[in-house]
Amino acid sequence: MDYTAIFVLGIIGALAAVILFVAAQKFKVVEDPRIDEVEATLPGANCGGCGYPGCRGFASACVSASSLDGMLCPVGGNATMAKIAGVLGMEAVVAEPKVAVVRCNGSCLNRPKVNTFDGAKSCAIAASLYGGETGCAFGCLGFGDCVNVCNFGAIFINPETGLPEVDEEKCTSCGACVKACPKLIIELRKKGPKGRRVFVSCVNKDKGAVARKACSVACIGCGKCAKECQFEAIKIENNVAYIDYEKCRLCRKCVEACPTGAIHEIGFPARKPKTEEPKESSVEKKITLTKE
């Protein structure tokens, strides 16, 4: 039996092993052991809401950062960030919680259908083909791409309105639904004190008459809300109003000023009904004049 071939293959294998060992030692990357510790404190959702590719990427970014300012795990929230700060010996920066908000009130009643889409039930596909089943080319398509990407079951399509609704208790503000919506009607906004917030539930950029014809509750860009706001929190751009939650003081005067009901108030106690002062009758007016 000829052992030459076996001997040669053995030498080649040994040389290859030595070369690989030397290369591994020379080019190995030594990871900071704190990355594993930080990753262990994270919820492991790997949702990407932090802006990094998964929990491992976020953990690495935290370890490399000089401070945790601007760093936030939306799923774990401030409690998780406090644990990370403890591991890294840094100061935890408290961030205001956010929640996904659907900026479209074009329900089946407010925005009737004018045609039917007979294709794949996907918002992304429908948006690439045409403007939608209603006269508003900016509103929700209602096929549920946002529902499909939510890993927390925090968003669902209301069968009566045909619009997505957010369960605030389940929403982690990961932003997956925001990225999935081709119409850009979902936004992450500050949850607000006691869950109170005010926002314009419309993104229609058509001029007032056109927008109102397509949807009875559309923003018509009249500017009444902006004139009423004392804090300069509202701006009109491209025929639609937008409320800056950083400037908004939740006075709700804009809600009353809006002629179409496009501005929504969430989490506030019910308003007290306005009581009208009793009007004087003509007889009472005559008696008053006689006395004078």
Image (cartoon, grey):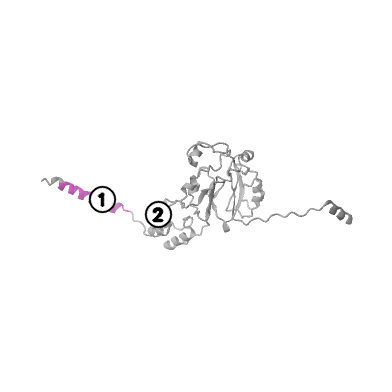
Q: Is residue 152 left or right of residue 269?
A: left
The circle drawn on residue 258 is: none
Image position, residue 140 (x, y; %): 54, 43
User: Which quadrant, please, contains the C terminus?
Assistant: bottom right
Q: Secondary structure at mark 1?
A: helix
Relative depth, front residue between 171 and 188: 171
Q: Name the amino acid type tagged 1.
A: Leu
Image position, residue 6 (x, y; %): 15, 47
What is the quadrant of residue 62 in the picture? bottom left
The circle drawn on residue 20 is: 1
Magenta stretch: includes residue 236: no
How far apart are labels 1 and 2 at the CA level? 27 Å
Q: Which of label 1 and label 2 is nearer to you?
A: 2
Q: Secondary structure at mark 2?
A: helix
Q: Residue at label 2? A: 56
Q: Is residue 3 left or right of residue 35?
A: left
Helix, strand or loop for the magenta stretch, by majority: helix
Relative depth, front residue between 92 and 259: 259
Image position, residue 224 (x, y; %): 66, 47
Q: Residue at x 41, y 59 (%)?
A: 38
Q: Is residue 47 left or right of residue 192?
A: left
Image position, residue 211 (x, y; %): 61, 40
What span is colored magenta in the figure?
Answer: 6-28
Q: Name the amino acid type tagged 2.
A: Arg
Q: Is residue 85 left or right of residue 283?
A: left
Pointer 1: residues within 10 angstroms few (<14), some, or many (20+)?
few
Up/down of 210 relative to 99, above or below = above
Q: Do the residues bearing badges 1 and 2 touch, measured as CB atoms within 8 Å?
A: no
Magenta stretch: includes residue 27: yes
